[in-house]
Image: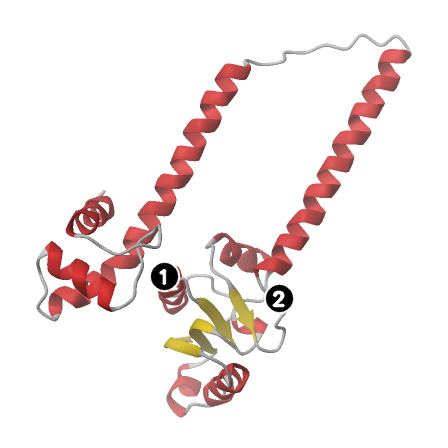
Amino acid sequence: MEGKFVAYYRVSTKRQGISGLGLEAQRQAVHQYLNGGRWKLLSELTEVETGKRNDRPQLEQALGLCRLHKATLVIAKLDRLARNVNFISSLMESKVDFIAVDFPTANRLTVHILAAVAEHEAEMISTRTKAALVAAKARGTVLGGQRGDHKLNHRRGNRLSARVRGATASKRALDLLPIIASIKAAGATSLHGIAQELNERAIPTARGGEWSAVQVSRVLARAEN
């Protein structure tokens, strides 16, 4: 096993969290899975709540660390994330790779495959629809409809793409805020000092490079908006 990882554990009750019941078994499973190779466990976060809720601050923090460090989220059991497919899909949209020890193949690739199957089905429906239209036209059925403005659609696509990029940048800025706050609390309050500390913590920029004072300033400005 190689790479950087963030472990996420979940226990159902506060009593389990205090006593360690269930938690220790999860931690042991994760460490056994990672045993061997060159790997680094950056952090271990534990959530104490029921599996039916989707608002999980510790999971959000874990995902944020994964995005910042380009790390993989590792969990002991798949049901520790959630018991519904929609939540797993939301996790996939976070752009974070994850591994479930009891189901190692259930990662982003798995979801991509399922998405590809759904996309293929949509294409098949489209093909059948076009074939039906051709058959209808051959029977003499009058077909028509507004084709739309291609230039307008192109502009709309560009605006949508820009919004997606902006949302991704804003999410990353919010992920960085707790890290920057801890750096400031440790005494590095200047933009240059924060940038230097981010580099020392091996947190890459969005493009994978090193931090500068200007980039830190941009992140802080985006987080405030």
Q: Quick one: which residue is furthest to the right in this view?
A: 139
Give the amino acid at mark 1: Gly
Percent position (x, y) of residue 95? Answer: 47, 55
Percent position (x, y) of residue 18? Answer: 37, 88
Query: Which residue sits at x=33%, y=46%?
Result: 169
Q: Decide which of tag 1 and tag 2 comes sooner along the chain.
A: 1
Label 2 secondary element = loop
Question: Where, by quadrant of the figure, is residue 148 drawn?
Answer: top right
Answer with left or right where residue 195 lies relative to residue 19. Answer: left
Q: Is residue 193 above or below residue 172?
A: below
Q: Is residue 220 above or below residue 198?
A: above
Which scheme is used to colour this image of the protein? secondary structure
Query: Which residue sits at x=42%, y=66%?
Result: 71
Q: Which mark is residue 222?
A: none
Quadrant containing the C terminus is top left
Give the amino acid at mark 2: Ala
Separation of residues labelled 1 and 2 (CA atoms): 20 Å
Closest to the observer, 145 or 17: 145
Query: In this orientation, does residue 45 appear?
Result: no
Percent position (x, y) of residue 24? Answer: 46, 89
Percent position (x, y) of residue 58? Answer: 37, 69
Q: Which mark is residue 64?
A: 1
Q: Residues within 10 Å of mark 2 (few under 14, many from 20)?
A: some
Q: Is residue 165 above or below residue 158?
A: below
Query: In this orientation, does residue 100 appear?
Result: yes
Residue annotated with mark 2? 106
Closest to the observer, 37 or 108: 37
Query: Which residue sits at x=24%, y=63%?
Result: 199
Q: Residues within 10 Å of mark 1 (few under 14, many from 20)?
A: many
Label 1 secondary element = helix
Query: Which residue sits at x=58%, y=72%?
Result: 78
Closest to the observer, 86 or 206: 206
